[in-house]
Image: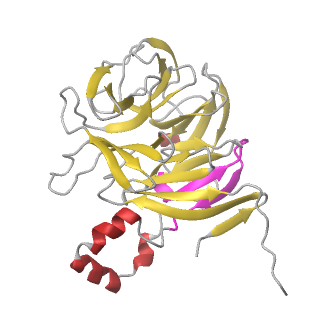
Amino acid sequence: MALIQTIGERTYTYSHCVGSLFAFTAPTDLVLGAKGVVYAPSRGADPGYPLGGRQRWTKWDLEEDVKIVDAGDQGSNDGELLWPTALDLGPDGNVYITDEYLNRVSIFSDDGAYLRKWGTPGSGEGQLDGPTGMRFDGEGNVYIAESRNNRVQKFTADGKFLSTWGKAGSGPGEFNMPYGLHIDRHGDVFVADWGNDRVQKFSPDGDLLAQFGSSGSGTGELQRPTGLATDKDGDVYVADWGNNRVQVYDAEGEIITSFYGDARELSKSATTFVSANSDFVKARKRADTSLEWAFRRPAAVAVNEDNQILIIESISGRIQIYQKEEDYLDPQFNL
């Protein structure tokens, strides 16, 4: 039975999950493509590869729960990745990926062919040190958060430096290893301030507009937030990585609710994988599978036009999907 939680005028229903450990191995981001398609970069190892030996990005069909494209490999040569962190689709339709170790942005075609790269290591304007979060705005420019330079930089799609803001610290507008980055429909920039356990919101020019969250595991508190997203109502979804949950805030930063994971059934792809191995089937009959329900290091969140909330987990390698209901009515019962 699907989990339903109603908070005030908002109702959320758990829908289903897609993928599994071997679909996304240690994913770090999640981006929506065409309807029913998502993209994710991964840092983990597939079966048959040494640990860390399959740095890549994946294009996935949500409906069929199958892989469409799998591209990239471990290394520092052109077209290779070492610490892929954020991914976004550029105005040209190509796939852009930040590499936190190689301090560059690699660009691939939508079908996985390597095209080019840009970025040089350093702390000067236009240079990169630990590029993590990345998102394009509505004008085709790209914002990048840097974990080691503790700032946000804005570039054109071909890597021309435009502007920057931020410095190391815990004060307003300062950062401690910023990670995920999101741009809402108004062009405002949200940054998951990983080391400061908070979210900061800026104008497109870098003016601080708001901040919320503090260190801890209580309601509304955060422990190493990673990815974040907003919906069309302005609610903010934050992957609270260290607390194994996703927290939901309203547009003013007031806590609404939290998701902890509800994957009571395997995804379509995971079911196929398990069913093909009789030893797995027997083992699952003996195991307490309720331990699988909960999030295991949620890394990123995306919200589509249908108000579906997609949450990818770095350990479980799957996407759990919730539905934010619209015009929800309490069911009537015959008494």
Quadrant of res 47: bottom left
Identify the image's colour scheme: rainbow, by chain, secondary structure or one colour. secondary structure
Q: Looking at the rendering, in which quadrant would you find the N terminus?
A: bottom right
Q: Looking at the rendering, in which quadrant would you find the C terminus?
A: bottom right
Residue 257, horizontal then vertical, whole percent: 66, 58
Q: Is residue 130 among what the camera can see?
A: yes
Quadrant of res 283: bottom left
Question: In the image, 192: left or right of 210?
Answer: left
Question: In the image, 114: left or right of 242?
Answer: left
Residue 259 magenta: yes
Number of numbered discs:
0
Q: Nearer the viewer, residue 171 or 294?
A: 294
Residue 263, horizontal then vertical, whole percent: 48, 68
Q: Nearer the viewer, residue 67 or 193?
A: 67
Residue 290 magenta: no
Residue at horizontal 44 percent and vertical 33 percent from the top: 88
Residue at horizontal 52 percent and vertical 38 percent from the top: 193
Furthest residue in direction right, as rendered: 335
Residue 92, horizontal then vertical, whole percent: 43, 23
Q: Is residue 29 among what the camera can see?
A: no
Residue at horizontal 59 percent and vertical 28 percent from the top: 173
Question: In the image, 268: left or right of 246?
Answer: left
Q: Is residue 294 above or below residue 164?
A: below
Residue bounds of the magenta highlight: 241-262
Q: Is residue 325 above or below residue 195?
A: below
Question: In the image, 42: left or right of 61?
Answer: left
Furthest residue in direction front, as rendered: 64
Q: Nearer the viewer, residue 33 or 137?
A: 33
